[in-house]
Each structure stands twice: as C-alpha cells, then as structure tokens.
Amino acid sequence: MSDVLDLTRDLIARKSITPDDAGCQALIAARLQAAGFSIESLRYGDVDNLWATHGQGAPVLVLLGHTDVVPSGPVEAWTSDPFAPEIRDGVLYGRGAADMKSGVAAFVVAAERFVAAHPGHTGTLALLLTSDEEGDAIDGVRRVARTFEERGTRIDWCITGEPSSTATLGDLLRVGRRGSLSATLTVRGVQGHVAYPDKARNPIHDAAPALAELVARRWDDGYESFPPTSLQISNIAAGTGATNIIPGTATVQFNLRYTPHWDAPTLEGEIAALLDRHGLDYTLAWHRSGEPFYTPEGPLRAAAREVLTAFAGTPPEESTGGGTSDARFIAPLGAQCIEIGPVNASIHQVDEHIRVADLDALPDLYEALIARLLPPAR
C-alpha cells in the first residue's frame, strides 16, 4: 500500500467527530517534526489547531485543512463501519475519505517529499489544520487567524484541500467563495381566536409582504466568476399546532450567499430598512459566517491552472461556487486563496469514498504545485 493510503486509513480510523481531533493532529505533528518542520499546537476551548512550518521568509505558502468530520449517521446504513476504512473494487470507504482526511494525508506526504528533495527551498511551506471546520468554526481557523493578525504572521498563498473536483480529479479550480450571512427574524403579533381577527394581529400575515419582497429582489448580476447574490428562506415557524389560534409570533430563518459587491453590514442594513418600511414589530439576529473572497489572475492561479491541466488533461473549470470553507478566514489576512481537492460527490453521505487511484495521485499534484511556488533556492 502507498504511504498516502496508509496515512488516510489511519486518520479515518480515528473517530474525530467535530470538534474532537481524536489524535489526528498528534500523529501528523510527529511525522512533520521528523521531516524537519517546526510544530506549534494552538488549542482554543475544545478545538485543536496545528501550525507546522519549514523554511523561512517570503513567500509563505499555507496548506489548509481540517481533521474533524461530520457524524456518520446510522451506522447500519453504511455498507461497512464508517470508522473502519475498507477498500472495495479500488475505492476507499469511510467517514472523511473525501472530506477531508484524504486531502490532509496528501498534504502531509507532499510536504514530506518536497522538503526531503528541496531542504533549501525558497520561502516558507506551512500546514494549518483545525478540528473545528465542520462545527461552529469559532475556535478553529477563525481564532487562529486572529492570533496570526495579532502576531503579524504573513501568508502570501493558501491552498485548501477541500474536495472540489466534480467528476475527475483536478477538473475544477476554486478561485473564491461567496460570502454567507444567516438571519433569524422574529415577528411579533397578538395571539387570538381565528374567529375574532379584529382582536388579534397575525404575524404571518404581517411578515408575508416583506418576505415576498426579499425573495423577489435581484440583489446583483454577479461579479467576475461569481453567480448573482441569492437569498433563500430555510425555515418558517409559528403557531401552537391548533388550527383555530392566530399565533403570537412567527420565526423566519434565511441565508444570503453574496458576491464581493456586498459585505455583511451593508446587507444587514438593507434588510432592516426593508422590514422597517413594512412596519413590522420584529427582532433580527444575524450570524456572519464569512465575507466573500476572490483570487484574481496571478502566480498562484496560473500555477494551479498549469498543474491541474497537466494532471487532468484539460484546463480546469475556474469557479467560485459551493458553500464556505476555512479559506474565508485566511483571505482577510492578505493571502490569495485557491481550493483543490478530491471529487466531492460523496461528501457528508453514507458510504463516503474516494478512488484509490485519485488518492495515490493527490500528493503528486500538491507536490508539483508546491515546487512551482517555492522553487529550490539558487
């Protein structure tokens, strides 16, 4: 078996359901320290974060990943134990096989190979791992980024190993992500009997015109390779379950995925003004998941395009789609960020998996990219 396959299996076998690292980072730290990396463990609350560096000075290239996974769901729904990695017909199965213990293992193997071949490379090669990507994302990379900002830690380029390929390894290069802003809107009315609406005030009826305006609005026409900003209502709740009671409150949850035309404070102000204009009696609680980021044409994007074209045989699609990633916390430090990783078709699903052939190729892909960005010192 290959080194990357062995390490991926070792990581999958550790039941690191967010935010529990379950010893993954200790295993990785020992390997990287033996390879000559300087190791720093940054634990905040219940979250483990690992910062490993080799070399010095600029440019600083960071390989960003996470060791935590989502819960498996009912174990009996899986063909095999989700935390007992198993290969069937050339495919490795287990929770985290795609998201993202394979990417983390490939980062480690690529880093080991690169520094062994080029101990005097230009600049700094670093790995940043957290156990809080799949959870609240409070004490993980978000908190580490704040520490880096306080220290003045510089990052020039960041490669996130999230599963981003769609059909074949290397067919997609993610060059940014939309911002994500969530809200819980509570509209207050007056509870009463449905037969006497004059003695009550229905918060659902009050909220409906405002909600209709929110969902009908065209926020923008997109930005560069970003699709237009989208607002989606995810939950509406009101009432006691009885059909003859006008509810006293209604709760609405919604989310915006937005382009660099916007930032969270501006969107919050726009929406509050709309609700005020409709005369609602309301409270609004916001959760800012992350601002949008975008990597324009430059050395990082060009190197990634060239390496992926060589691996996939055709130029990759360059996209800003998908959800969020921890790169949203690194980009504000001034870093250019891209995402390259395995096929994402099975992530968070029962029988999550990765093709062994793809796993074996992944360290070569990352090592080639590292070598392009941090060439041997002359």
Image: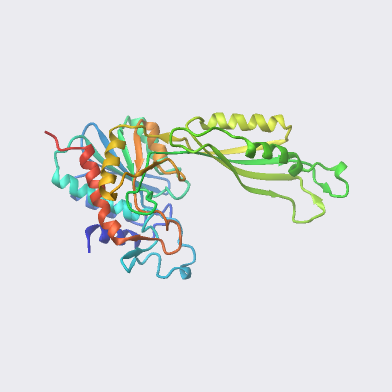
Single out the residue that lies furthest toward the front: 314
Residue 315 falls left or right of residue 249: left
Q: Position of residue 90 (x, y in %)?
A: 30, 66
Coloration of the structure image = rainbow
Residue at 30% over, 47% down: 314
As drawn, 195 above or below 82: above
Residue 17 falls left or right of residue 240: left
Q: Quadrant of the N terminus?
A: bottom left
Residue at 11% over, 33% down: 378
As drawn, 28 above or below 14: above
- Residue 38 seen in this snapshot: no
Q: Nearer the viewer, residue 230 or 142?
A: 230
- Residue 2 seen in this snapshot: yes
Q: Nearer the viewer, residue 26 or 86?
A: 86
Q: Nearer the viewer, residue 306 or 155?
A: 306
Residue 70 falls left or right of residue 307: right
Residue at 44% over, 68% down: 78
Q: Position of residue 156 (x, y in %)?
A: 30, 33
Q: Position of residue 200 (x, y in %)?
A: 83, 43
The part of the image, by quadrant, that contains residue 184 is: top right
Q: Position of residue 279 (x, y in %)?
A: 74, 32
